[in-house]
Image (spheres, rainbow, N blue to C red):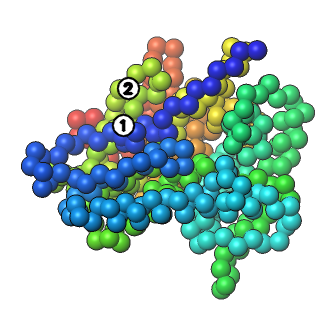
Amino acid sequence: MLFTRHVLPASFLLSCGAVLCACGPTDNAAQPVVISGKTMGTYYRVSMVGLDKSREPELRRQIEAQLKEDDHELSTYKDDSVLSRFNQYLGTAPQPVSRGMADAVITSLRIGEKTAGAMDITVGPLVNLWGFGPSKEPVKMPDAQQIAAARDEVGLQHLKVIQQADGQYLQKDLPNLYVDLSTVGEGYATDHLARLVEGNGISDYLVSVGGAVVSRGKNPQGKPWQVAIQKPTDKENAVEAIVDLQGMGISTSGSYRNYYELDGKRLSHIIDPATGRPITHKLVSATVIAPTALEADGWDTGLMVLGTDKALALAEKEHLAVYLITKEPNGFKITMTPQFKAYLRDAEK
């Protein structure tokens, strides 16, 4: 058995985050303050214009505290996280969660419904079965019986959010239901950091956690922040397109970022809930621009599962700003919606 694991950086946006195409002026006063580091198994980066350097240590403390809180809520790698405790609970009574976590689940359920279950935050048993869960151990190819058993524990209809005067709750009607919010975790954390930065009186910034990015205001040159979509390959670091975010959130999902090779077959970490198996179609990258990074992060996963034709049809129906890259025999084919084209840098249109 030949097993090779490949995990690429969690983002195609920013080197270790997004690729910033705008360069700041040469005078130090106009240079952005950048706070960066590791979180949730990936990297975060916060670039701010107009921040007094003396405030940087306190803001770094706040940023790291927020990221630690988000990780404590959503991690499936930590047994004591809020989500892990919910997954470990083998009952069906409602369990309390934060408003933010409830909103993340509500958004995920809504996108899951619109994608006919392609984006499914209960797909964890299948993810774990194929070796992409917290253990990250090599696996033998699951057989049909194992896949069918795992699929019996999957389904958005088994999960709901209850909102009451005293708080928010998650409830499952399958005791073994396993919820995995990693598909929206980067967007969730990015939006939180953006609100934190704005709460500190900063109106010009770009924030990224993994492949999710949010920007507001202007870069050091007084122009809109620009980010680049990287070519979908693990063999080169080249730009496919550049967009002006115009105050929106953006997220990219790709089938080549996290995969392993087993007995000569390349298996993507993106699992199709309908088949219980890794996707095999030729769509290799889906980028979505949306009002929040959370929403963009949810949509990009669902579209990746659907494949190019179904993803494009749904994006057009929902009026989404979507940029798809499909592998073809002679290279890559680019497909985008008119809504996405409006964000492309003029030279790219």
**Image quarter (top left, top right, bottom left or bottom right) of the N terminus:** top right
Does 348 sit above or below residue 177?
above
Give the SS element for disc 1: loop
Regarding residue 312, the answer to whether it shows in the image is no
The one nearer the camera, 225 or 85, is 85
Residue that appears at 81% across and 62% down: 89
Q: Amino acid at mark 1?
A: Ser
**Side of 280 relative to 44 (left or right):** right
Q: Which residue is mark 1?
A: 15
Does 276 sit above or below residue 236?
below
Binning the other alpha carbons within 10 Å of mark 1 as few (below 14), some (14 to 19) or many (20 upward) gives some
Question: Residue 49: horizontal and vertical position, in percent?
Answer: 22, 58
Q: Which residue is mark 2?
A: 237
Label 1–label 2 contact, CB within 8 A: yes
Binning the other alpha carbons within 10 Å of mark 2 as few (below 14), some (14 to 19) or many (20 upward) gives few
**Image quarter (top left, top right, bottom left or bottom right) of the C terminus:** top left
**Side of 132 relative to 244 (left or right):** right
Disc assigned to residue 120: none
Question: Residue 63: horizontal and vertical position, in percent?
Answer: 42, 61
Tally the marks: 2
Q: Amino acid at mark 2?
A: Asn
Of all residues, the one furthest to the left in this rendering is 27
Q: CA distance from mark 1 to mark 2?
A: 9 Å
Does 231 sit above or below residue 311?
above
The one nearer the camera, 302 or 32, is 32
